Amino acid sequence: MSSTDVRQDVPASPAASAMLDAVHPFDARGVARRFRHAAIFGALDVLAPGETMRFMNDHDPLPLLRQIADRYGDGFEVEYRHRSEQGVVIDFLRVE
């Protein structure tokens, strides 16, 4: 089976499907710099409790993380999934 093939014979469990649906990718590298923070805040605003935005960027967004903490308080759990010189992947889990 190649990496592009999809197995049709193995149904996803409801729990697995719900987990996949609850993680929403947001690749900031494709958003013009002048619109990035507004787009990120807009995406975070519409997340329901239990949903995650998986954020990808070409640098560690420390000023943005401070702004998110100021704006949302304890409303999100933040977890780095990947951090390197090439970029970061951060999960923002909506908790309230």
Image (tube, rainbow, N blue to C red):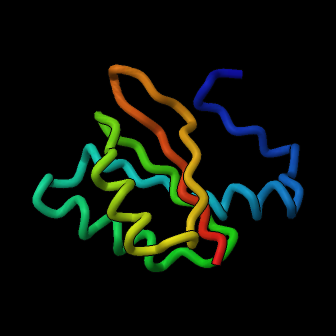
Q: Quadrant of the N terminus?
A: top right
> 76 above or below 96?
above
**Residue at 38%, 69% in the rendered image:** 70
Q: Quadrant of the C terminus?
A: bottom right
**Residue at 81%, 54% in the rendered image:** 16
Q: Position of residue 23 (x, y in %)?
A: 61, 57
Left or right, residue 48 beside residue 90: right
Q: Position of residue 51 (x, y in %)?
A: 63, 67
**How many numbered marks appear?**
0
Where residue 95 sits, quadrant-wise, is bottom right
Q: Position of residue 42 (x, y in %)?
A: 35, 74
Left or right, residue 76 beside residue 38: right
Where residue 81 sits, quadrant-wise, is top right
Left or right, residue 70 beside residue 21: left
* Relative depth, front residue between 8 and 77: 77
**Residue at 66%, 64% in the rendered image:** 22
Q: Position of residue 74 (x, y in %)?
A: 57, 70
**Residue at 41%, 22% in the rendered image:** 84
